[in-house]
Amino acid sequence: MAERARLDEVVAGAAASRGGGCSSSAATGAGKTALLADLADRALDVTVLWTAGIESESPLAFAALHRLLRPVLGALDDVPPVQARALRRALGEREAGGRDERTSGDDRFLVFAATLSVLAEAAEQQPLVCIVDDAHWLDTASAEALSFVARRVAADRIALVFAVRDDQARRFDGLGLPELPVPGLDAAAADALLAEHTGGPLSPAVREELRKRTAGNPLALVELPRILSAEQLSGRVRLPSRLPLTQGVERAFLDRCRRLSEDAQTLLLVAAADDSGRFSVVQQAAARLGASDDALDEAERSGLIGVTATDVRLRHPLVRSALYGAATTSQRQSAHRALAAVLVRAGDPDRGSWHAALATSGVDDVVADGLDAVAERADHRGGHEAASAAAERAAELSTSSPRPRPPALRRRP
């Protein structure tokens, strides 16, 4: 497979101190996430760091960068102190006895330089492969920091692999990185995938029609046979006239979800609404909504989520959009309200405030005040775009019209 070989070349280059990267683009369900997971599984004698853009998290400055760097933040002790201080502030960490300083444009450069320094220090121990999935949903600050790094690793043992969905309105600037499009499967691969995932007889004519109508999209070829009848698969009944890829795949995910208990469905909705990816957060928020301890096991057995000791990951971005989009407004608000409570108690007020805002349909000055505080903290960290987004949403939720700008934003023109 040409795509795997190209990614192997990127990793091999990093191992030989010829750092670089590439930007992989694909249609929804074409297998980019699976390709990245395969790369992570096959990469030997390297350290793999993984992050992903999440739509609901895009207003949070440096959120995706924090997830990527979390396993190697110990290297901060080995980078220039001025860089370390800037990065710690950007990631919301306050040094003991340190001042709550506002991040300037120069500090923003220091944050980017510190990111490169931390990765370079970690790469001294073992080559690094930084995987960034759904890069089109990166928060602006993280995207700029990673772009900065990608332009400066030619002599380092660092590889960066970005993946984007090319059917999204929001775009990610690939920085002139080599592009790696992920096409649909060829006839032989598509036939093999259908044979593996179809439980009963499959007519050759139906197999060919499914391959053509999905353009060889792997996720569609896996999921659509689950929702087609045995008569349709065998060719005794014609296939539906319309098989829209995204709608068909999302419908398959929803059908699987609706066969689960109410508690398991609640946990899956919380996981879809969550943007932290932390197992403890999802479990506690689901418990606040009445989900039992057995709900997690049932949801995991369904194959819709993957769970480790610390993380929860939905199987595919379409699982998130399907589960979240199918929920009622009150169900989504309940999930966000539970997540807000858990995140605030866990010491993550920024995410907690945004979830509180998503749980609010009218005006609420308490929630607005929380977002003003988010704007203040984001501005101090140099996340000016995130600060503006929080202040704008606070104004929408406020009973004061016009609402005064937060102090940090009043200092800027």
Image: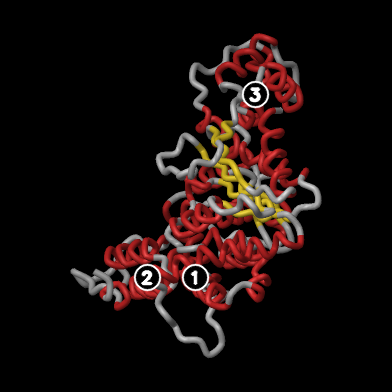
In the rendered image, the quadrant that contains the C terminus is bottom left
Q: Which mark is residue 185?
A: 3
- Pinpoint residue 278: horizontal percent, then vertical percent: 63, 63
In space, the residues marked 3 and 2 are separated at their CA atoms by 45 Å
Front residue of 105 and 292? 105
Q: Which mark is residue 90?
A: 1
Q: Secondary structure at mark 1?
A: helix
Mark-to-mark CA distance, 1 and 2: 13 Å
Give yes or no for contact between labels 1 and 2 (Cβ–Cβ under 8 Å). Answer: no
Left or right: where 140 falls relative to 224 = left
Report the side of 362 relative to 311 (left or right): left
Q: Which residue lies most toward the left here? A: 401
Q: Where residue 71 sits: x, y (%)?
A: 68, 64
Of tags 3 and 1, which is closer to the observer?
1
Taking the spot 67% from the left edge, 35% from the top edge, the residue there is: 6
Near-viewer residue (7 or 149): 149
- Confirm whether residue 33 shows in the render: yes
Tell me what residue is drawn at x 49 percent, y 16 percent: 241
Please state which amino acid type lies under the numbered disc 3: Leu
